[in-house]
Amino acid sequence: MRTQVGIVGAGPAGLLLSHLLALRGIESVVVEIRSRDYCEARQRAGVLEDSSVRLLREAGLAGRLDREGLEHGGIYLQFAGERRHIDFRELTGGRTVTVYAQTEVVKDLIAKRVAAGGAVHFEVADTVVDHLDTDRPVLSYASADGARHEVVCDAIAGCDGFHGIGRPAIPADLLTVREREYPYAWLGILADVPPSTDELIYSHHPRGFALHSLRSPTLSRLYLQVDPDESIGNWPDERIWDELQSRFELPGWDLKQGPVLDKGITPMRSFVSAPMRYGRLFLAGDAAHIVPPTGAKGLNLALADVAVLAPALDRLLHGDPALADAYSATCLNRVWRATHFSWWMTTMLHRTPGADPMEAELQLAQLRYVTTSRAAATSLAENYTGFPALAADPGTAD
Ligand code: FAD
Ligand code: DHB
């Protein structure tokens, strides 16, 4: 078999890349180890930056997003018994974020690719990428019926997440890896209850961090800081709600409770592997970098990578390697900004196990500063809504 771009992984990065390439008349084959149902149900991120929304809109993918997405003009930071608002619109000249679940982005992308007759193969096994240092790299896999397939490509995109086969296919001595594990994890629930807030609440509390997010006017998404080795079995729904009540408690405000539809624990890690390219293999999204979720950046970074990659591959396939050569550095600039912001939000808001009282005072000093200084609040707002703005990336210029 022959295609122009072989894509490993049908997450947001792989699917959007396939669509952006199709808009440019470039054919691709996407292979995914999971089933379509699994990909469409996996609970993950929920917040889209301003520039991610614009990117999806410009790519003709925002029909449902524009109808169902909830635009938010700020967030609340809660600490020391007070809840303070950070007004993104006012601080950034009108920029906002949109609450629209990753599951919905993935559903929209799969529907679009399938309707366009795009090749998206689910439930494959034993994916291998080879001949990466030639201009005919090969993607091979076993399809759901067990048959083995070999696809000769012009380029391959490793969009296969943190545990995929893309990054390990690059000789280890060519990669520089920077990594930090955080001494806590997030327990997340999806609850069948209207949100108790109009915008997200990030709460710093002596018992640990908590986040009140949402998915729709009738669905709430809530997170609790827990120990990194915590087992979900130790957290019956009642204990989760009790803990959430304590960490969000505020006189005159109530946290509404409802049936828990989904729950899980996510480890917290910063990870950056560079460069994001080896020969004709290009990594995008979680395959190359992971951020702790506190800044809501993981999904947005994945989308931003492929917005740079699509025009770079277009040019490469037409004989001009300049954007492909700049791909890694262009993306890593944004990745490191988001890595710093996510680390900063994470360490400001979480209780550090075993930390001395000095650290807690420093966190409170930072929280007071960010909620009282216009300069500090603007920095948070600019990063949260997306910095640098996607259109400013040189790699996206046509
Ligand atoms: P993924 O979405 O991971 O997609 C990669 C795809 O590749 C998967 O479908 C996988 O099945 C497939 N794949 C893997 N190996 C192979 C193979 N060998 N062959 C073929 N296919 C393969 N971010 C936030 O901002 N907020 C959050 O609350 C948040 N929560 C998260 C919770 C969890 C449990 C995880 C894992 C991540 C979370 N993230 C969150 C991060 C965010 O969801 C990711 O950054 C985003 O999914 C990255 O998209 P991606 O397309 O790069 O990778
Ligand atoms: C969500 C996740 C985040 O990591 C975050 O910072 C904000 C919202 C969410 O899943 O809704």
Image (cartoon, rainbow, N blue to C red):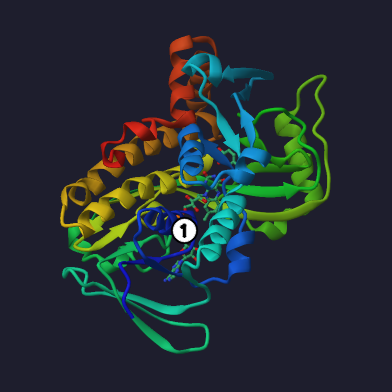
Q: Position of residue 257 (x, y in %)?
A: 83, 41
- Secondary structure under badge 1? helix
Viewer can see residue 100: no
Q: Quadrant of ligand 2?
A: top right
Pointer 1 residue Cβ closer than 8 Å to ligand 1: yes
Query: Does 258 sit above or below residue 387?
Result: below
Asked if residue 343 lies left or right of residue 249, the reply is left
Image coordinates for residue 270, horizontal then vertical, percent: 40, 46
The residue depicted at 36 percent of the width and 33 percent of the height is 391
Tell me the residue at 22%/69% (across/down).
132
Give the vertical position of 180 relative to 123 (above or below): above
Residue type highlighted by circle 1: Leu
In the foreground, 51 or 265: 51
- Judged left or right of residue 229, residue 127 is left
- 10 Å neighbourhood of mark 1: few (<14), some, or many (≥20)? many
**Horizontally, is 348 left or right of 306 in the view?**
right
Asked if residue 68 shows in the view, the reply is yes
Figure quadrant of residue 338: top left
Image point 27% across, 55% down: which residue? 313
Q: Quick one: 47 or 106, which is closer to the camera? A: 106
Rendering quarter of residue 217:
top right
In the displayed structure, 221 sits above or below 355; it is: below
Q: Give the position of the N terminus as an image quadrant.
A: bottom left
Q: Which residue is mark 1?
A: 15
Q: Residue at x 30, y 67 (%)?
A: 4
